[in-house]
Amino acid sequence: MHIHIVHAHPEKTSYNNALTEAAFEHLAHAGHNVTKSDLYLEQFDPVERGAHYKNRADRDVFAALNEQRHASGNDTLPIDVHREIESLRSADLLVLQFPLWWHGPPAILKGWMDRVFVNGGLFSSRMRYDTGYFSGKRALVSVTTGAPQKAFGPGCRGGDFEVMLWPLHYSLHYTGYSVLRPFVSYGIQGHGYSYEREDSLRVRLKQNLSACRGYLSKIDEIEPLKFPGWSDWDEDGRALT
């Protein structure tokens, strides 16, 4: 199986980087073909704008969807976007690794989606949801957060991960991916923030890395999250009862 990891953390000594490296090494050792995009290291530009398109469909007004569709049809997508799309096309499983910042992914990852999931190439009016471009492929979110696990859930202080990850999960579903249950790493304390003894934290994070490897070892057994498809809506997009 070909697995592509998109890593979104600016610090190479971070626990996110440790998770990415653990996943990469474990999956490669298991015989999979593993590739990686490190968005910060590669200085990926997350801002979609007209300057990215040299062969513009409309030089007077920038409309992202129009320019993406035009560039996709004329094979003039920006080089960095083309490279990322090729990585996605060849992968059977996409893994997104990032920290939870302000109850969502870092801006660079959201911008990566803005630019890489191009209109006309990876989605259209009918090529989406369960008939999406990546139908038959799977996606997994691996996310870290500083607060302990008990602080998360419906009505809890830290928020509900099912709600906070919904926009990202639904966007992956929108492009056709079968979205697997996420792997959440809790209590990843940053520099200057400490809620437990250092020796206890070190042991727990080591155990979490082992749990991540174990989760990836059973990747074929993980049931995808449930999302509606075309047969669940009427012609106006409303849920059928």
Image (spheres, rainbow, N blue to C red):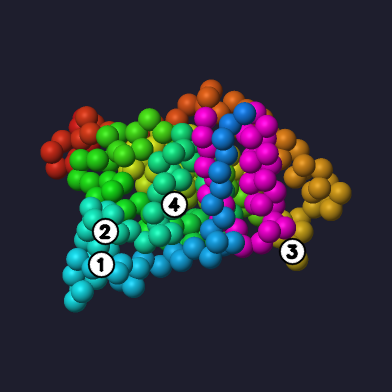
The answer for how far apart the CA atoms under marks 4 and 1 are is 20 Å
Mark before the other along the chain sequence, 3 or 2: 2
Residue under pointer 4: 84
187 to the left or right of 239: right
The kind of residue tagged 3 is: His
Q: Quadrant of residue 23?
A: top right
Residue under pointer 3: 191
Q: Are marks 3 and 4 in contact (CB under 8 Å)?
A: no
Residue under pointer 1: 55
Q: How many marks?
A: 4
The answer for how far apart the CA atoms under marks 3 and 1 are is 46 Å
Q: Are marks 1 and 2 in contact (CB under 8 Å)?
A: yes
Mark before the other along the chain sequence, 1 or 2: 1
Q: Secondary structure at mark 1?
A: loop
Q: Nearer the viewer, mark 3 or mark 1?
A: 1
Tell me the magenta residue range: 1-30
Q: Are marks 4 and 1 in contact (CB under 8 Å)?
A: no
The kind of residue tagged 4 is: Glu
Q: Is residue 173 magenta?
A: no
Please report the residue visible at 26 percent of the width from the left and 58 percent of the height from the top: 71
The kind of residue tagged 1 is: Asn
Q: Quadrant of residue 101?
A: bottom right
Mark before the other along the chain sequence, 3 or 4: 4
Furthest residue to the top?
A: 221
Label 4 neighbourhood size at 10 Å, few (<14), some (14-19), many (20+)? some
79 vs 32: above or below? below
Residue under pointer 2: 71
In this rendering, does residue 76 appear at all?
Answer: yes
Q: Position of residue 143 (x, y in %)?
A: 58, 48
